[in-house]
Amino acid sequence: MNRYLQALLVFDVAAPAFLIGLPCFALFWAVLTFQNFLLQKTVERDAYETRSREVTALSAQLAPTRAKVLLLKSLLSTGDIETRLDRGIAAGLEKFSSDEAEQTLHDYQTGPSVIGPNLGEGRRLSLKLSSRWESLNTATADWETRFPTMILESMSIDLAAGSAVSVPYLQSTLSYFVVTEN
Amino acid sequence: MKVNFPDLRAAQRSARRQASVRRVFSKYAFRGPLEQAVRWHLFYDGQKVISVVAQGKGAALSWSPGPPLEAAELGKPDRLQAQIKELSHGLKLSTRSQNSLGVVLHLADEIDVGIVQKEFENPELFELARAQVRETPSEVVTDLKTAQDPSIQWRYYPLLSGQQAIVLRHRLEFLSALQTLSDLDIKVAVHSAPIEMLAVYLRLYAAAIEEKPHCIVLFYDRFTVVVPANQGVLDLKVLPHRQQDVPPAFGDDMFSLLEKFGLVESCVLLLVPCGTQEPTRLFRELDSYAVRNRKSADGIDIQIPDKESVWGQFDKLAPGQVKSEIIQRAEFLTDYHEGPGKQIPLSLGIKGDEERFGILSLDTFWPDDQKSRDEQLPRSFAIAIVALRASRFVGLLCLLGLGGWLALSVYNASQGNVVPVLPEMISSQQAELIQLSATRLYLSQWDKVLSPRSQAWSAMDFFLALLPEGKDVVCDRLRYAIRPAAAGNGPGGFLREWIIEGSCTDQGRAHLERLREAAVIGQIFAATAVRLSEPSFALSDDRAIKAVLREESNPQFTAANATDVLPYQFRLVVTQIIEGSDPLAFPQLPKALPKTGKPAG
């Protein structure tokens, strides 16, 4: 190989590549890395500030409903549900005398609702009552308001035997499905 | 090829010196001495130096007296350089042209003819032989040592008409001094004065030689060159004077040569004065030899060219420019020839020789072996080196720029333009956001699940809405149920059904029959929705309602019990279908709230 070509390759190509090209590359890499680092930090900062604003806005939005969350959690809780339901139904009936409304049977089962699989597994409550129309209407409105988790699956109301048409006495059967947080 | 580091370093220095930007962009830097803007012609015959300067080319070529130089000064580098500086100054050469100077030394101090090796005797091998004699003269010239002094240079000349080849030798007495000029980027060439003179006279006498054989005798002070030509150059003999005014055995040598080629009977002997001596001395020498040896010289026509007529012929080269009093030496007129590198013709005859010697006269005796050629940096390399130097500069600028950029970025960052956020803050905030979002979702989803769809109190109220006031209708049994809708109504859809069984009068029957009308039953649903504020009774495109009434005569009705028993029995079935696309359709139960962080509720 021509000695000038060798000298050119060594001193004008290889040496500058090593002494200038490599540091250039290293510096370029350092600059890019640092810029990426800054960019990442800026993005993180922006994201942090955006999230902060979202947290503030959500907190403000949810502030009035915090109590509702607690209530919902309490209503949907499966813990001690039968006792709570019993108390609620009893509270609805205790306003009336036994002539006006009387519970003759209640029964709990566990399983899926007849309404469909969307509601999952839950408690099923069957009630039998002897009552007058108004008493039954008021009592059901009372416990259905206390427990919005109760979904009426079926209801049958029959005239009690020997009941006068003018002041009817009714035998009713109600079947509820109680939605819970599974 | 092994090259060590010091050699490479030296090569790099030499390359750098030759690869200046000025040289790369100069049109003269990589050209030969005769292609330079200014040529300094020096004629040296061993005693004196004739110095003339030529500028321009072709018709624009002009001549002027060169700086005076003594013979001894040719060997003094300082003196040569000083003269060149003075010459550049005197000619007011521009900075760019100062290095576009060629020095052409025309040597006539001594010349020698060698014997060509057998394998190169064929003149048609001249291309190979010309190259070989520059590299290793010992392979072309017989009886030469392998190791040659670079100041001894041989060149090969094919004589096609003579079916032979000759080699001529010049000794470059001032090689080392001239090499210092070469180091200063001044192009140097050494021409053989006798060959140049032969080229000139072949040109002048080509027509005459075609008509009659000639023998050209170039009469220099230290030697005489004899060239017999008959339709072409037949031979070339060098007769050294050996400290005398004429060659010691001129007559004998001349007659031997003429007899060898059969030219004694008819030939023109052209005695060309090339030195300070008059050629009549040669004529006398020849005449005395013929008388002494009883040789007949009747067929030999002796001519001595008239100086004025010869220079007049030269004037045709460049009318008005060729002045003998300035140019002084006809050898310098090779400057009018086309540059070297031209293809040497192979044609026989005087025209071929005229052209061949015109080219060969430009052959420089300057060392031209591979080693010396390797010393010259090719233009392509010079361009590459300059380009790489420029790229190095750009690279340095990039390095500085990148360094500055990095420093500025670090400085800006340190000035607080970018405030770092601790990972703990980010994760804590993310957890809080997730908790809040989950709470919002939880609320919206459970709100939807727990929307009133099926409650006893509203179902009972709807029963009452279906029946008229009074005693026209008596109900025995009420049934209510909720069931999933058929699969065609979409997932989550459901239907509600109200069933009333009882008895009625004619008026009650008429009321119940009206319920089968869609408008009537729809109006009852809509009114119930408003009265109870219960959206599940509201009408929409995603909901369907229908009422089916079955009625028949009451078998227990008789005229006797007409006051207690009503005449008709009926069964009314009212159905409401809510499709899966309805907002009230049952959704999938949501997942429980995540139990991370503090409770959002």
Image (cartoon, rainbow, N blue to C red):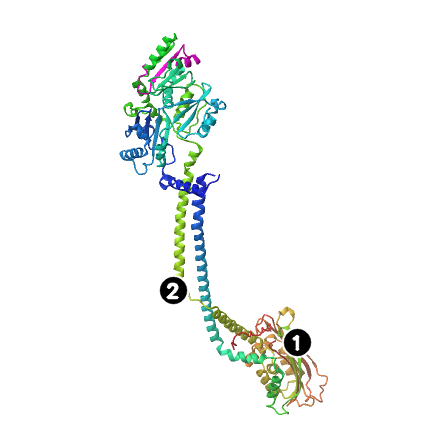
Give residue A124's position: percent from left, percent from top.
Answer: 65, 80
Give residue B256's position: percent from left, percent from top.
Answer: 42, 13
Q: Which residues are magenta?
A: B254-280
In the figure, residue B15 lies in which quadrant? Answer: top left
| Identity, as a three-letter code, of the amino acid under mark 2 | Gln
Q: Nearer the viewer, mark 1 or mark 2?
A: 2
Mark seen at residue A114: 1
Between the residue at mark 1 and the residue at mark 2, the CA separation in whole angstroms equals 68 Å
Give residue B98's position: percent from left, percent from top.
Answer: 31, 36
Residue shown at the point (40%, 11%) measured from the top left = B266
Secondary element type, mark 2: helix
Residue shown at the point (45%, 61%) measured from the top left = A37
Secondary element type, mark 1: loop
Mark seen at residue B313: none
Chain letter of disc 2 in the image: B
Relative placement, left or right, of A182 versus B350 is right
Mark seen at residue B415: 2
